[in-house]
Amino acid sequence: MIIGNIADRIVRGVETVQEGVNEALFEPVIRVGITGLSRAGKTVFITSLVANLLDRGRMPQLGASSAITAAYLQPQPDDTVPRFDFETHLAALTASVPHWPDSTRAVSELRLSFKVQPTGILGMLSGLRTIHLDIMDYPGEWLLDLGLMEKSYAEWSESAIVAAKSRGQSAEFLARLGSTDVDAKHDEQQAKVLAQSFTTYLKAAREAGYSDCSPGRFLLPGELEGSPVLTFAPLPPSEAKRGTLAREFERRYEAYKREVVKPFFRDHFAKIDRQVVLVDALGAIHAGPKAVEDLRRTLADILSAFRPGRVGRLLALLGQRRVDRVLFAASKADHIHHSQHPRLTAIMEALVRDARDRANFAGAGTSAMSIAALRATVEETIDHNGEMLDCVRGRTSDGKQAAFYPGELPEDPSHILAPARKGAEKWLDGDYEIMRFEPARLTLKPGEGPPHIRLDRAAEFLIGDKL
């Protein structure tokens, strides 16, 4: 077995070097990971991005777009990973009665290839070259699990219970936990009930706007649903003697890290060059100060998992990778008037300030912006009792058109972050409202992708230097 493992590692190493040499010298590959926290719009982002890279009429800020002579979809390189269902998702957004596509529930991949005409004398001599863009879609809930790799069961339990005590959705779980004898002999039925109670609390917390709701597979279990590796919960400190509930939960937590988290990191996450983190910042602000502070901490934890920094040419040839660019994007910018977009961007920059400082120090480029991958609204100004309000109008779930005024975001982001850091229960100067709009009916001209807000700037930051 040991000899087999060594041989397997050698074969993997040789394949990695071969891939690295081919990519560096012949057909470069840009691997971009797309993730986001709950309801951030990952599927819509990828669908609109690919559609607008295929038809670049709405991408003026993608500076290299003039050098792209052709773009086309190809089979993804990894035959074991499901293909991102681009065509089905685009059909949902462009139907006669458009609707939002299903959300991300597992890893998927898509390859978009470009024919690019290099500039300058060398470009004229070398002719067209091929560049591949591999887009990997994965649930943000799974990304949060990478932080568990450095935590023992006792450390995770302590932090999870502290978080639960600060959230109203945990009352039933905490009551059940308080009546549990963690040093009693392990009983599988009791374990299932406690794990289910913990899972129910995590789902409720996510619905309430909280970002850190790990372990992520408790929310999106997939084929692991009902398995022992997902049947555990945080417990208070104990001696964890053999045969007790505490010892069994500790064993399953370690199995979760070993069998679920580590393979995801090794097989998918570690191959990423650049990363997009989509954030429903408006939703967190609407949920209140505690949700905003939870989001700020989660974003810092997310970046720490990326191993940000630059890799030299030699290490790149050997297949070594680090994330050298990270985009933090506040989605759903079309839900507020364009006059407030700079304020939303400033809040986003403040939320990721700690994370960006660490990434910049490590040599990675970062950017924060507000975007809408698919514009679902139009803007209008309404006279309300003599006061002119900048509103957005869109299609509601009942098919009707409605104008909406969400309120004014503060010019100073500290008016959001300061109450959040202090643990305030609510905003002192009123609530910030949000409204769910359905996709607008589209009429696309030849050569144009779906309408968006700053998707071209996002693409330029992510891949512009490679084209």
Image: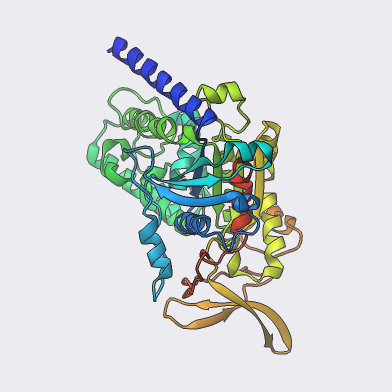
Q: Can residue 222 be seen in this view?
A: yes
Residue furthest to the right in view is 412
Count of residue discs: 0
Q: Which residue sits furthest front?
A: 125
Q: Name the spot of residue 429 as percent of width and height, x first.
A: 70, 68
Could you say which quadrant of the image residue 78 lies in? Answer: top left
* Colour convention of the picture: rainbow
The image quadrant where one finds the C terminus is top right
In the image, residue 394 sits, relative to residue 328, either above or below, namely below
Q: Position of residue 213 (x, y in %)?
A: 46, 47
Viewport quadrant of the N terminus: top left
Image position of 115 (left or right of 258): right
Q: Could you say which quadrant of the image residue 274 lies in?
A: top right
- Measured from the top left, where is residue 371 in percent x and y? 60, 59
What residue lies at 40% left-to-right and 35% top-to-bottom?
Answer: 264
Answer yes or no: is residue 102 visible: no
| Residue drawn 62% across the image and 53% down it | 66
The answer to whether 408 is drawn above or below residue 77 in the figure is below
The residue at the far bottom in this view is 385
Question: Horizontal placement of 453 versus 137: left or right?
Answer: right
Foreground residue among 242 and 80? 80
Image coordinates for residue 45, horizontal then vertical, percent:
50, 56
